[in-house]
Image (spheres, rainbow, N blue to C red):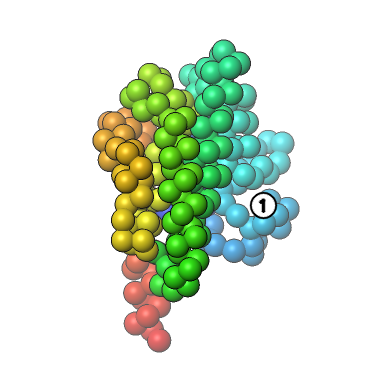
Amino acid sequence: MLKLYGFPLSNYYNKVKLALLEKGVPFEEVLVNFGAEGKAGKSPLGKVPYIETEHGFLCESQAIVDYIEARWPTPALIPSDPWQAAKVRELITYCDLHVELCARQLYAQAFFGGTLPEKFVERVKGDLIRNLAAFKQLAQFAPYAAGDTFTMADCAVYVSLPLTALATKIVCGEDLVAAAGIDWKAYVKLIESRPTAQKVAADRKADQARAMSAAKAKTDAQ
């Protein structure tokens, strides 16, 4: 059975998990923590998610989702038309690289108790405003991210847009996703009408509670 390594608080872990659930692929979840320890030969940079298959290990969420699509083509999460398939992958690239990766620079302050220099925050904010405007030009939300059908683009957008919105609201004092004219809350509500997304969301919340409990126990022990 395919094994998915990572933790349910990770948006990229959930990107892969949602694709697997939508495909109906049997898989086992294996909880692993931050850092490179124990990941040698599995995920060279120590990042999650990664999967274990009969052929070996594979890391990087988009490579994994593309493998899943090729290995289990039905139900399809990408259009059969080459142009439309390319447009789905284009949207995923914009979401992962130009939106989420840019917003990730704020996570240290938003979620992990760090403090970022004001000039740094202003630079990231400017980049995000520009990048979100570009993303909005490509995304359709009609009603799904790439059109009228759920695709692997939704696996990426659903797990990253809310995180970007939350991080910017905490650090910048403004939800930059909403400010860009993207009604991400309505979109999330649509996606979470799907049982697969409901499971992803429930598992994420449970993992968040677990992480908070572990952090409290560590603090109390000091």
**Vertical comparison of 49 with 66: above or below:** below
- Residue located 57% across and 52% down the image: 48
Q: Is residue 15 visible?
A: no
**Furthest residue in direction bottom, as rendered:** 222
Type of amino acid under label 1? Ser
**Res. 84 image quadrant:** top right
Nearest the eye: 86 or 66? 86
Query: At which x and y percent is residue 112?
Result: 43, 68
Query: At which x and y percent is residue 135?
Result: 46, 37
Provide the secondary structure element on which disc 1 rests: loop
Quarter containing the N terminus: top right
- Residue located 54% across and 57% down the image: 32
Q: Give the side of residue 35 with respect to residue 22, left or right.
A: right
Q: Give the side of residue 209 with respect to residue 72, left or right.
A: left
**Furthest residue in direction top, as rendered:** 81
- Residue located 48% across and 58% down the image: 124
- Residue located 50% across and 23% down the image: 77
**Res. 58 image quadrant:** top right
Dot 1: few (<14), some (14–19), or many (≥20) neighbours within 10 Å?
some
Q: Is residue 100 visible?
A: yes
Q: Which residue is mark 1?
A: 43
Quarter containing the C terminus: bottom left
**Vertical comparison of 98 with 193: above or below:** below
